Amino acid sequence: MTGVRNAQRALAAFTELAGRAPKRSTYIEHVPGAWVLVTRGQGMSDVLTPEGTNFESIAGEVDPVQMQEIVRAHLIANPDVETIHTGWSRPAAWSIEVLREMGKLGNVNEPFEEGKVYVTSIDLDPELLGMIDAGDCVGTIDQQVYLQGWYGAALAWQWVTNQFLIANDISTGPYVVTQENAAALIGQAEAGIRA
Amino acid sequence: MTINATDPVSVDGTDRRGRDDFRRRVNRMVRRIPELGIFSTLVLLVAVFSIGAANFRTVDSYTSILTVAANVGIVALGCGFLMISGEFDISVGSVYLIATLFFAQMANAGLIPPLAFLVTLILCAVIGLVNGLITVNLRIPSFIVTLAAMMFYRGMHIILTRGFSVSYKADKEFLEMMAGITFSLMRNTVIWWILLAIILQVVLAKTRYGNWVLATGGDAQAARNSGVPVSRVKVINFALCSLLAGFAGAANMARFLTSQSQLGMGMEFEAITAAVIGGTLLMGGKGSMVGAVLGAIFVSVIRSGLIFFGYSSYIYMPVTGIILMLAVIINRGFSNFRLLQFQRSDA
């Protein structure tokens, strides 16, 4: 199910930092009821709940002001939240700003601290990429279209028209962006190689 | 001493006259301050949430509620003002969106930010002006005109940006004044909102133009017969409504520095909801800016309060729907009561 790999990656990153699974995790559906977001939340729950994490999906908004205040209210009401997961890069960046204002933002470059909150996302944009590079966001999933089927279709077309076949396997699945490779992506974007 | 059955002092010894006096005083107060109802309900709601959820009673929580309320509230002021004059504008969400793009593009192109902001407001007012002129001159319902405008401006944003976010890259000093933080966590947008509400409330309650607005919404034909320039009032209010939506959009840009096509989606309904909960009649002729402010805070308190009470945040929309329906029913009851009183006094 979608969301399983996201949760596994997030769990691994948090466990590396804290030495345990998060006590409480929140997943934000920025478009409440959107099927892809709902199932992603279910997939994340399937991974995190057996680890003892109190996992919850909450309804968000695409309006940044409302989204930020929903996150703020949720964090004030539930101070034990340790990770926030979003289905889009913008809510992740907005959540990071709120966490910074509240003095609760966890940074992967610093030792784990109780009470801090760590953020993961899906998709990326220049602002979130900068936050990943700075360690303020744990990571995100890059969903460039060529990694999700177009690449496969283009290679099939090459085979049909030119009998061209590449020799090795190519990863066409989601690509995880962390602090390790964020700088490279920023460079590629600046060079115009990718959006 | 004999006791007459019609005497205000009843047979069981209770002072009916006193009770009647009290009821009359309350009625008079409610008539003089119609926002008393929503204000009392709001106080009660805050008290319930504060008692039920300890974390609700924090400065962070209250400022958070005001921040959300200000965002919708600035738009609700314009919607309320227009609704009082008997018209609707459901394009405010799209105007809010397009304002973010106008502001960012002009500032990025080198126009100094305060000027870019001013031109943004003028352009938004022109959008409202066009909506108003079409509505009054072609006699097309404002719902249809602004529905078309809503689709047009959101579509134009997507065409112009190709769906990508547009970032603000100019000087940020002015933006701090627009949407920065002044008192603790209090956003400046809250201060702008309150200032705008005070100005508009004074215009509505204390000026000739305010009388025209109320008269236009109450009975357009009677207002026209009394010399009120009904069409002009409506067109001006359309422009004002779009201008305020543009103001809120520019404030959003000042805070988040990006313009993206999802911004302002559904905002029109939240703004109208706030105005109606605040006592603005859907048919026009009644309402106030104080009510619109209280309505916006009310909606924001509901949203936060439900989160603090541990309810799923998905419940916010159905709860708001129920509250809106109740507000409309109460408003309808109020207008029927007023009509009845008028007919009685006429007889």
Image (cartoon, coloured by chain):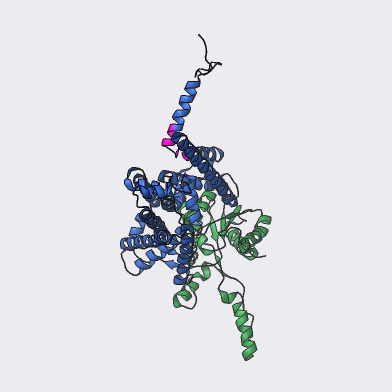
Q: Colour of chain A?
A: green
Q: State whether residue A195 is above or below residue B45.
A: below
Q: Which chain is blue?
A: B
Residue that appears at 57% across and 55% down: A59
In this picture, residue A147 sits left or right of residue B159? right
In terms of depth relative to the viewer, which is nearer, B87 or B92? B87
- The image quarter containing residue B173 is bottom left
Q: Residue furthest bottom?
A: A162
Is B97 part of what is drawn in magenta?
no
Where residue A18 appears, as percent x and y from the top left, is 58, 56
Where residue B171 appears, as percent x and y from the top left, is 34, 63
Magenta stretch: give its range: B28-39
In this picture, residue B251 sits left or right of residue A42? left
Main SS, magenta residues: helix
- The image quarter containing residue A26 is bottom right
Is B37 part of what is drawn in magenta?
yes
In terms of depth relative to the viewer, which is nearer, B17 or A78? B17
In this picture, residue A75 sits left or right of residue B84? right
